Image (cartoon, rainbow, N blue to C red):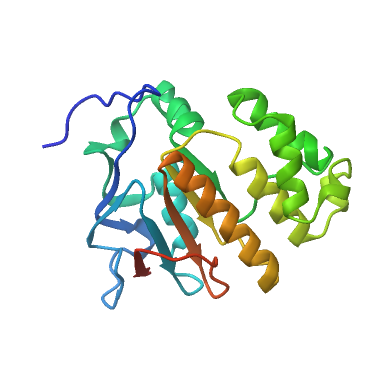
Amino acid sequence: MLSPIMDTTPARKMETIQLNNTLPRVFAGHNSISSDVWLKNVVMERGKRYLISAESGTGKSSMCSFIYGYRQDYSGVIAFDGQDISNLSIAQWCDLRKSHIAYLPQDMRLFGELTAMENVELKNRLTGFKSRQEIEQLFQALGIADKQDSLVAKLSIGQQQRVAIIRTLCQPCDFIMLDEPVSHLDEENNRIVGDIITREAARQGAGIIATSVGNHLKMEVDQIFKL
């Protein structure tokens, strides 16, 4: 039975994300759903790495939005450590997004009128998680050190994607959830991103949930789910 209240203080780690008989409502009534996630009981554990391999239109971005609490148009249950997320308060969601789930949406949600560094600093000011030197080192490692002071609107999609990845890592977390994080990156930058994300996850003991419709994040995984 699901507990009525979830303690989301930073001292407590989130250990599991569970999808139980979950299905986007738009798929209701479909008789030919073949999925390792939808209408199944799936448990993802902190510290493990998961790849959600999908085809377009199968609901991968919807799944991420459901888990992050952006959308509620699904049936079934999504639970964090056994707590149905539909019962969470606004304050709990704010804490979860600040301290427990680092999320990179497919559309990146950057501010085009701000510079690359300003986009990253917006988040880091809220968390105080990375030093300026650590952030600059990430820009350097991802080959965009010369773009720190460039407006995001002037950057290529691949450069924007790398800025969004840096921003995503500027927080403590138990899970790093990435929706098509390397869709616009070449093989070498994919490898670099994979190394950076896996190192950060290992440092925090965090799980990784990465979705892909083709260009998979280069990392070793514990389990692949076919969406």
Query: In screen coordinates, is 167 left or right of 77?
Result: right
Q: Is residue 147 left or right of residue 67?
A: right
Which quadrant holds the C terminus?
bottom left
Quadrant for the N terminus, please.
Answer: top left
Q: Does residue 86 show up?
A: yes
Give the residue displayed 26% in from the left and 75% down from the top. Answer: 31
Q: Residue at x 76, y 40 (%)?
A: 136
User: For the view shown, which residue lies furthest in the bottom direction?
Assistant: 32
Q: x and y percent of residue 70 in the render?
A: 48, 42
Residues 59 and 170: in front is 170
Q: Nearer the viewer, residue 176 or 61?
A: 176
Residue 69 x, y percent position in the rendering: 43, 40
In percent of the image, x 74 and y 34: which residue is there? 133
Residue 185 shows up from this direction: no
Q: Position of residue 96 (x, y in %)?
A: 43, 31
Q: Is residue 86 left or right of residue 41?
A: right
Q: Quadrant of residue 184?
A: bottom right
**Residue 124 location in percent, x, y?**
65, 29
Q: Residue furthest left?
A: 1
- Is 4 placed above or below 200 here? above
Q: Count the marks.
A: 0
The image quarter containing residue 90 is: top left
- Taking 35 as reference, is 173 left or right? right
Residue depicted at 84% across the width and 43% down the height = 148
Relative to 129, residue 136 above or below: below
Res. 217 image quadrant: bottom right
70 or 144: which is nearer to us? 144
